[in-house]
Image: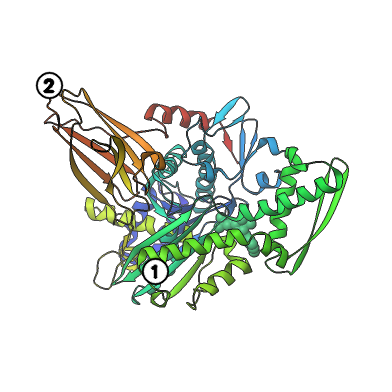
Amino acid sequence: MIPQWARNLQLAEAQLQSNHTFSFYKIMSNRKAVGIDLGTTFSAVAHIDPYGKPQIIPNAESERITPSVVLFDGTNAIVGTVAKNNTVAEPEKIVDFVKREMGKSKQQFHREFDGKNYSAEELSALILKKLKSDAEKYLKVPVTDAVITVPAYFNDSERTATITAGRLAGLNVLQIINEPTAAALAYGLDKLDEDQTVFVFDLGGGTFDVTLMRIESHRLEMVATNGDHRLGGKDWDDVIVNWVAEEFDRVHGENPLLDLQSYQDLQSRALAAKIQLSSRPRTTIVHNHNGKSIKLELTREEFERMTRHLVEKCKAICEIVMQEAKMEWSEVNKILLVGGMTRMPMVREMIASLSSVSLAEDVNPDEAVAVGAAIQAVLSLLHEEEISGEQMLPAATRQQFSTREGGLIQVRNITSHTLGVVLWDETQLEEYVFPMIRKMTAMPATAKNSFGTATANMQRAIVRIVEGESTLPTECTPLGICDVELPPFLPKGSPVELTYEYNANQVLEVAVQACGNCATVSIERKTGLTEGELDRATQALGQLTIA
Ligand code: AMP
């Protein structure tokens, strides 16, 4: 029997295009894909409605964005505003800013609640579970697939961790896409006829990304990208927190930051003060701790002076990206502002000081990334249709996301980091990094190179994979190791062929072929979960009730 929701959707589709009713019901009953902006401070979900329009999906609390905060309460994990509102009352039960920890192993980062350790992936999975479950309640269909966004500057382990979080939440992760690419998709979907260059400035709660995108012949191409994934609104908040704490210490001889509750309270007061200073010239901050109190006035001018170094960092990264792209500001047509922090006057003034390029006003800084991810989700399903030959989406949707020539809208990303291998330099007697796939290579990318064994009769080829722009191994991030057994009695210099494949998600696969041995080994990452660990973690998370 067809459920009521399916009949309603069938009706909606029938009004749209009567001869595609069946195929629409079919996809809605099998697969429903959403776009998820998994943010440092807030997350958002969007989908493409039956009329082909991107829509934000409100959460169970009827909010369009959900705070990325988790509150552990026995067997309940409460995600969102209720958790956020408890950061001061129950700081020991709260986790926030998890995105900044993505890609770290459990040894490097974990939080313990009720005797159980949670990794950054697992904590992110709880946020994703809440988003998935709220979307299902709203759409009245199971949500099976998702495109999840990450900062363009996220590295291999941070991306792998995001995919793992999606899988732990029970989602088929269609693709991981860069936040600026998603924002440009949301902006450019109805402007693909105008060739233009767009500068995406994305300053959120915890990360900063700048990306140059080119819209040309109905294609969206990333030209250059740079950023700092540990620079965001929290750094501005911390400046206020530290200033108030120092003043408190000066007046009362006590550091309020040593008390967790007092620290959380000060954090939320600092955040509120920062937001107020975006629309008011001055604000007052009151902080109480241990029966003592302080009341301070902060002007926008003073706040801007205290945080000038942060905005200067953003400015430097903008200039670097222009240099990397070998472009002049006069070649940029629009600036897209994404992320809540772009509402700050000092950030807008800095951008205005860089160039006279106009701002794209029709972009919602809080929602554009989720909307772009939803567009990419539908594009991914349409690509799957092309490969399988099976029609899964209504023809109207295909038309909506096709160019005038009939092909699907193309999105092309570039790599944000160089991927290399550590080699031995016989003349200098030292290790160095050989770049296999350079930064700014179009994706997906493949590189093949042949190297000789360093000594005669080598037993194993141990390939050390690193990420970074330096030739010194110590200045790069180790990604993992491929360990291949070699045939016996090989002379020195025997060929070992290395293949790096960087897929559309910017996740690396490595293969090693040694002397006809044809051993193909996948990268063993320092971080991330094995399949067994993934199953166990999924089961453990399943025991928590998500609200
Ligand atoms: P996002 O990660 O894009 O959700 O951005 C959230 C960040 O933007 C947080 O640090 C917020 O405090 C900050 N934010 C949001 N609105 C404003 C505002 N009006 N003025 C200054 N900062 C803001």
Q: Which residue is mark 1?
A: 189
365, above or below 34, in the image: below
* Relative horizontal placement of residue 27, taking residue 288 as reference (left or right): left
Dot 1 alpha-carbon crowd within 10 angstroms: few under 14, some 14 to 19, many 20 or more: some
Of residue 426 and residue 489, the one placed in the foreground of this image is 426
Residue furthest to the front in view is 428
* Relative horizontal placement of residue 23, taking residue 10 as reference (left or right): left
Q: Which residue is mark 2?
A: 489
Whether residue 53 is visible to the viewer of this picture, yes or no, is: no
Residue furthest to the right in view is 291
Of residue 190 and residue 59, the one placed in the foreground of this image is 190
Q: Position of residue 440 (x, y in %)?
A: 33, 57
Q: Position of residue 489 (x, y in %)?
A: 12, 21
Residue for point 71% across, 54% down: 240
For badge 1, the amino acid type reads: Leu
* Quadrant assignment for ligand 1: bottom right
Colour scheme of this structure image?
rainbow
Quarter of the image where one finds residue 429:
top left
112, above or below 390, in the image: above
Q: Look at the numbered disc 1 and say if its residue's Cβ is closer than 8 Å to ligand 1.
A: no
Mark 2 / mark 1, whichever is N-terminal: 1
Q: Position of residue 490 (x, y in %)?
A: 12, 25
Q: Secondary structure at mark 1?
A: helix
For badge 2, the amino acid type reads: Phe
Q: Secondary structure at mark 2?
A: loop
153, above or below 54, in the image: above
> Mark 2 or mark 1, which is nearer to you?
2
Quarter of the image where one finds residue 92:
top right
Distance from the alpha carbon under mark 2 to that under mark 1: 59 Å
Q: Check the picture and name the quadrant holding the C terminus.
A: top right
